[in-house]
Amino acid sequence: MTDTPVYEPPKVWKWERENGGRFASINRPVSGATHEAELPRGRHPLQLYSLATPNGVKVTVMLEELLAAGHTGAEYDAYVVNIREGDQFGSGFVAINPNSKIPALVDYSMPRPTRVFESGAILLYLADRFRAFIPDDPSDRAECLSWLFWQMGSAPYLGGGFGHFYAYAPSKMEYPIDRYTMEVKRQLDVLDKRLAETRYVAGDAYTIADMAIWPWYGVLTTGRLYDAAEFLDAQSYTNLVRWYEEIAARDPVVRGRKVNRTSGPLEEQLRERHDASDFELRTQDKIEAAE
Ligand SMILES: N[C@@H](CCC(=O)N[C@@H](CS)C(=O)NCC(=O)O)C(=O)O
């Protein structure tokens, strides 16, 4: 192993404003709003404030799946929260998510407006509300929730651990990259073995567990996440790749991936979504051509 400079922690840690690395400028050791900013509100009962990161995509895929399955009550307005610009610290956003992270949802069709934050909680809320993409049978439901919560507990090792040190840290350090690569490969193996037994993660049916896991561990196999597919030999997890491809081909998934996207090909960016027709009329290529 290569030597890294020795760091002697002080008795009390102090915040140094710039510690390097991507996102360092928005990270703070305190919570709460930094500025006043009202959230926009559209005409539908469901208002989503998000961005097309893996955690954001989980929810836009679920909403598009619900609509495709005929749940018209799932119509929604989706607004971009630009986390690089600090929008997550605006007072309106903090009021619906005191943790200042996307995605966050407000349901105005309830007797009192209902806020939901944490992508897993949003998936479960929508699944229960529409009785869709979650099994009714208690044993099957337990399997689905086990995988949903597996994702919520495991992804921080992939994102905050592996992704941070492999892709975002200001320098490459062998110790943390090794430590998190080991864990992420173990997680990929857990999924691959499970998907050797079943078509979808929770069994025969496509559920919110798939929607939670796919944007992270599925997309990882393509290299679109952290450009790490080769490093992780991700294509060797063949059952996972098979499952990734089947889900990637679903129309609601193709749509959901575009919502709140602010980078990549312009035709794949539907920054704000207010209507199903927006996919035809309001992608960024069309908006810029009309300007
Ligand atoms: N456990 C949360 C994690 C959400 C999360 O980490 N969101 C990131 C983008 S994927 C974010 O908003 N980061 C902004 C920040 O940390 O300030 C969830 O699943 O909803």
Image (tube, rainbow, N blue to C red):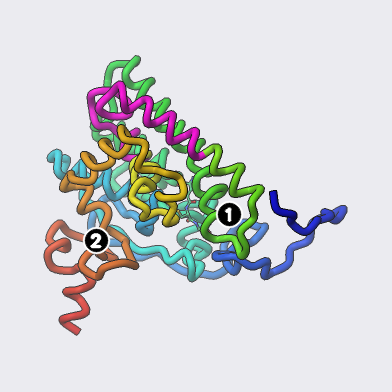
At 26% across and 65% down in the image, what residue appears?
Answer: 269
Ligand 1 lies under 8 Å from the Cβ of mark 2:
no
Q: Secondary structure at mark 1?
A: helix
The residue closer to the viewer here, 142 or 91, is 142
The residue closer to the viewer here, 11 or 189, is 189
Label 2 environment density (alpha carbons within 10 Å; few <14, some 14–19, many ≥20): many
Q: Is residue 198 magenta?
A: yes
Please identify the quadrant where the C terminus is shown: bottom left
Q: Is residue 264 above or below residue 195?
A: below
> Which amino acid, mark 2?
Arg
At 30% across and 32% down in the image, what residue appears?
Answer: 239
Mark 2 — residue? 273
Q: Position of residue 60 (x, y in %)?
A: 29, 50
Q: Position of residue 188 (x, y in %)?
A: 43, 36
At 28% across and 41% down in the image, what residue appears?
Answer: 244
Q: Position of residue 19 (x, y in %)?
A: 68, 66
Residue range corresponding to the magenta coloring = 184-212
Q: Residue furthest right?
A: 11
> Which amino acid, mark 1?
Phe
Most common secondary structure along the magenta stretch: helix
Q: Is residue 113 visible?
A: no
Cβ–Cβ below 8 Å for labels 1 and 2?
no
Q: Is residue 25 above or below residue 222?
A: below
Distance between mark 1 and mark 2 Cα atoms: 33 Å
Q: Position of residue 139 (x, y in %)?
A: 34, 15
Q: Secondary structure at mark 2?
A: loop
Number of numbered discs: 2
Q: Is residue 76 magenta?
A: no
Mark 1 — residue? 165
